[in-house]
Image (cartoon, rainbow, N blue to C red):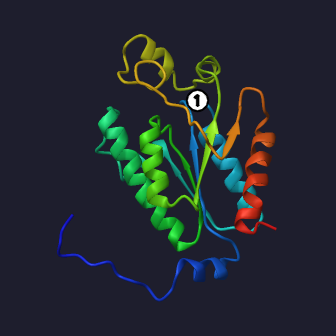
Amino acid sequence: MSTNIKQQNYQVTTADRANLLQHKSVVLWFTGLSGSGKSTLANAVEAKLATAGKLTYTLDGDNVRFGLNKDLSFTIEDRTENIRRISEVATLISNAGPIVLTAFISPLMKDRQQARDSIGTDKFIEVYIDCPIEECEKRDVKGLYQKARKGLIREFTGISSPYEAPLHPEIVVNTATMSLEDCVEKVITYLSPRINLD
């Protein structure tokens, strides 16, 4: 980091923006295997929040790799950098006031901890999408698991690259046994008292 920079303090604070929007900002960090339902659940939760009049923004793994992170591969090192950048972007958006939803595999515990530290433990809510890999493979509309098992995709999470499940997530949903509506309700129930949803 350069020694020629100085942190700028702003007159309008995060608390001011929360007062303006009439809700607090948090970051919902959806993590789980490919095909577990991260994006589907994040989209459904965002729709529910939007219907309730809350300002939101979703950062999705695939979408971000079309722009901000298009220079990154899927090596462990690049996955770490992917999550570092996303946590910084999520922090900026959260400080602006919206409720941020992120849908990323984010397979390593150390990277998710770094995201929690960057965003702030008071704002970071880890949502673990607990879904067996067998079920994820059944849902695999992109055929990624099949390609990975044939060796056509290297360093694929759950097959040739590790996924470290969260030890103490704030929310756990099992998308193999719970309906989408029940998963959304579980997230909203947890979230409601924390962001003044009523």
User: Where's the C terminus, which quadrant?
Assistant: bottom right
The N terminus sits in image quarter: bottom left
Outermost residue on the front side: it is 168
Residue 125, given in percent of the width and then of the height, sits at 61, 52
Q: Is residue 57 above or below residue 13?
A: above
User: Which of the 4 quarters of the picture holds residue 26?
Assistant: bottom right
| Residue 15 in view of the camera | yes
Viewer-proximal residue, 13 or 60? Answer: 13
Tell me the residue that label 1 is attached to.
Answer: 35
Number of residues whose C-alpha sits closer than 10 Å to that of mark 1, classed few (under 14), some (14–19) or many (20 or more) = many
Furthest residue toward top: 150
Q: Nearer the viewer, residue 140 or 94?
A: 94
Q: Is residue 151 left or right of residue 13?
A: left
Task: Using residue 101 as the reference point, say whether residue 174 is left or right of it.
Answer: right
Q: Does the image show residue 73? A: no
Decide: is 119 above or below 64: below
Which residue: 58% across, 25% down?
141
Q: Can you give x and y, in whole percent of width and height, for residue 89 in the image?
A: 43, 60
Kind of residue sitting beneath label 1: Gly
Q: Nearer the viewer, residue 192 or 99?
A: 192
| Image point (71%, 37%), residue name | 173
How many numbered discs? 1
Residue 197 lies, with reference to residue 141, above or below; the image says: below
> SS at mark 1?
loop
Give the answer, above or below, for where 149 lies relative to 179: above
Q: Where is residue 175 in the image (x, y as percent from the top left)?
A: 71, 32
Quarter of image, res 192 = bottom right
The residue at 60%/42% (across/down) is 39
Residue depicted at x 52% and y 26%: 142
